[in-house]
């Protein structure tokens, strides 16, 4: 509903919107700024905004003391592994639901969605117990499986809404021209499906990266990802704001960047196609 | 276009996803149900047999239960009101012509991508700390006594942190809905002299109705199970123990599996009541 407005009105809009935008973004900005201060400057009263002695020391200390790279690697493996595994399972399912729908397709989709509604805490002990019995507690493999299952309904739904937009006529045309099923999938469907698959991959990677119930409850040392790395900072030890900020910045930076690319897919992915 | 062979191929392609999700749903659910009827204390005598509905009555009868329900409702309700109201305002604002719209949008959306443990810790220490937090500095600057946010105003503080995390989600979805609004209809109303309030009330708000419902339902599902924000900030103290957190404490901290499982069943029932409404809306959308 873009309309033409006067310049004055536009200036007013711009000012208000930027002010609110910066206010909402401020906690993140403040964290990033603090990560470059010394501990003394981080708690200085009054707070110092920009004119402090910029230092990278906190990053070095955090990395040295807590082995940031190991947590980062765990996050990458867990988020990446669960997303890729989920896609491998979900692509064929979403594909067949979109292109060979049956009477029950809708019911299956809704049922899948309903498994997502199961509160994690309701099944905490069975999963915990199962993990102990199978020796999966504090293992990356175990978390990959759990996060894959948690996000599988979203992955199937997102893919389904994308695949449904691929016109069936194109497939029929390809078939008329004598394309085999394999050729049809490889040369006609796949190129059209790739953008949808990529968006699904991105959003679910972010969701898995930030997941903080199972990753906190099912890991200890070996498989702990960045969510647990940050939680370990919750017991303060003297002056630590700058280091906390450096750790936080390192934990959120990769995903903030990915997130900005995926803002359009976010709506579709999280509303199960109900809002486009 | 579906032949017999393509149908059975389709079934085969769906099978792994369906079977995995079925197992993921049923196995833990049945186990939770099973434990909820047993007296089971792994560290104090192990599994001591069937107790009927004792865990269910004890869970509800415990002095922590009703406060936890109240806390849950306050947090969920508070966050919903704040995010939906501010979300509508922000969506309408972001839809206006301005310079740098893309950048403002990115700034507003950013909190959604911050992992819950990070936002909880940053708010707790760098903003709400009564000595060194930014709020404390601000209060002192105006000559007021700094507030001990997470103990004196614990619930409000958590509502604020969680609202900050979810405002982007509400804004983004409502913005998508606002953008699909028919501009000509609004312009016609404006030319006919309808004031902003009337245009908003009779044209914009009804158009947003569906999106608002969806925001409320989806957020409720997620908000009912917020965990990290409480785990990191108050650890359930100062009246911030939600139902989810209470169950977590029963299961993993006091290792009373039977009692925790009964609580889990209550949580599942609660979530399903909300889910039914969400599913209806999504299901309707599938038909067209």
Image (spheres, coloured by chain):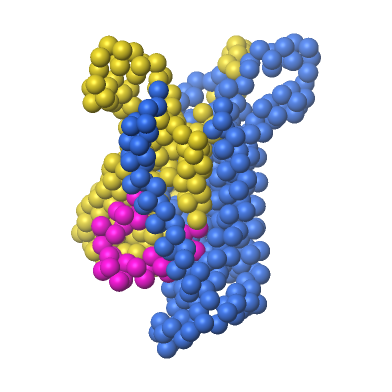
Residue positioned 32% across, 36% down in the render? B9
Apparent side of residue B135 relative to residue A137 in the rendered image (left or right): right
Work out whether residue A117 can be spotted: yes
Quadrant where the N terminus of chain A sits is top right
Give whichever of A38, A113 is nearer the camera: A113
Give whichever of B189, A29 is nearer the camera: B189
Residue positioned 25% across, 50% down in the render? A77
Image position, residue A208 (x, y; %): 36, 48
Question: According to the colouring, which chain is yellow?
Answer: A
Let me know if residue B183 is in the magenta part.
no
The vertical placement of B67 against B208, above or below, is: below
Question: According to the colouring, which chain is blue?
Answer: B
Image position, residue B214 (x, y; %): 59, 39
Work out whether residue A162 can be spotted: no
- Which region shows up in magenta? A119-148
**Magenta part, dominant SS:** helix
Residue positioned 53% across, 45% down in the render? B166
């Amino acid at each position: 509903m873009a309309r033409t407005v006067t310049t004055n009105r536009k200036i007013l809009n711009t000012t208000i919107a930027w002010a609110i935008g910066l206010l909402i973004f401020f906690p993140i900005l403040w964290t990033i700024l603090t990560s470059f201060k010394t501990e003394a400057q981080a708690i200085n009263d009054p707070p110092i905004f920009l004119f402090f002695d910029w230092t990278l020391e906190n990053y070095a200390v955090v990395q040295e003391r807590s082995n940031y790279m190991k947590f980062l690697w765990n996050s990458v493996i867990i988020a990446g592994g669960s997303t890729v595994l989920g896609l491998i399972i979900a692509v064929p399912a979403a594909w067949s639901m979109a292109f060979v729908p049956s009477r029950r397709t809708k019911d299956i989709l809704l049922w899948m969605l309903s498994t997502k509604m199961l509160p994690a805490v309701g099944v905490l002990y069975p999963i915990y117990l199962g993990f102990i019995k199978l020796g999966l507690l504090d293992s990356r493999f175990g978390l990959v499986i759990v996060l894959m299952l948690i996000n599988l309904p979203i992955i199937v739904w997102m893919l389904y809404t994308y695949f449904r937009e691929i016109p069936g006529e194109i497939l029929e045309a390809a078939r008329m021209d004598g394309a085999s099923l394999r050729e049809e999938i490889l040369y006609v469907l796949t190129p059209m499906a790739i953008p949808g698959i990529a968006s699904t991959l991105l959003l679910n990677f972010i969701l898995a990266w930030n997941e903080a119930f199972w990753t906190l409850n099912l890991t200890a040392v070996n498989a702990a990802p960045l969510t647990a790395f940050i939680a370990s900072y919750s017991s303060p030890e003297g002056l630590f704001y700058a280091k906390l900020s450096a750790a936080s910045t390192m934990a959120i930076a990769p995903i903030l960047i990915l997130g900005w690319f995926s803002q359009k897919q976010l709506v579709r992915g999280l509303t199960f196609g109900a809002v486009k | 276009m579906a032949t017999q062979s393509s149908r059975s191929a389709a079934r085969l392609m769906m099978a792994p996803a369906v079977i995995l999700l079925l197992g993921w749903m049923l196995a833990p659910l049945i186990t939770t149900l099973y434990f909820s009827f047993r007296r089971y204390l792994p560290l104090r005598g192990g599994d001591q047999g069937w107790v009927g509905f004792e865990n269910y009555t004890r869970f509800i009868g415990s002095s922590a239960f009703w406060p936890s329900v109240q806390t849950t409702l306050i947090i969920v309700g508070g966050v919903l009101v704040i995010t939906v109201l501010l979300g509508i305002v922000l969506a309408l604002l972001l839809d206006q012509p301005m310079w740098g719209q893309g950048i403002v949008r990115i700034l507003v959306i950013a909190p959604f991508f911050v992992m819950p443990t990070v936002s909880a810790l940053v708010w707790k220490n760098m903003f709400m700390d009564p000595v060194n937090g930014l709020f404390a500095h601000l209060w002192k600057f105006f000559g007021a006594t700094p507030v001990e946010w997470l103990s004196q105003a614990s619930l409000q503080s958590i509502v604020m942190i969680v609202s900050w995390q979810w405002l982007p989600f509400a804004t983004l979805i409502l913005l998508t809905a606002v953008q699909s609004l028919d501009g000509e209809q609004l312009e016609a109303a404006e030319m006919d002299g309808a004031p902003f309030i009337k245009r908003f009330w009779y044209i914009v708000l009804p158009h947003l109705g569906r999106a608002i419902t969806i925001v409320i339902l989806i957020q409720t599902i997620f908000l009912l199970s917020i965990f990290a924000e409480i785990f990191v900030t108050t650890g359930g103290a100062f009246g911030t123990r939600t139902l989810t957190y209470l169950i977590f404490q029963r299961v993993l901290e006091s290792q009373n599996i039977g009692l925790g499982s009964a609580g889990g069943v209550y949580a599942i029932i609660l979530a399903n009541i909300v889910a039914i409404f969400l599913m209806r809306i999504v299901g309707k959308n599938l038909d067209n």
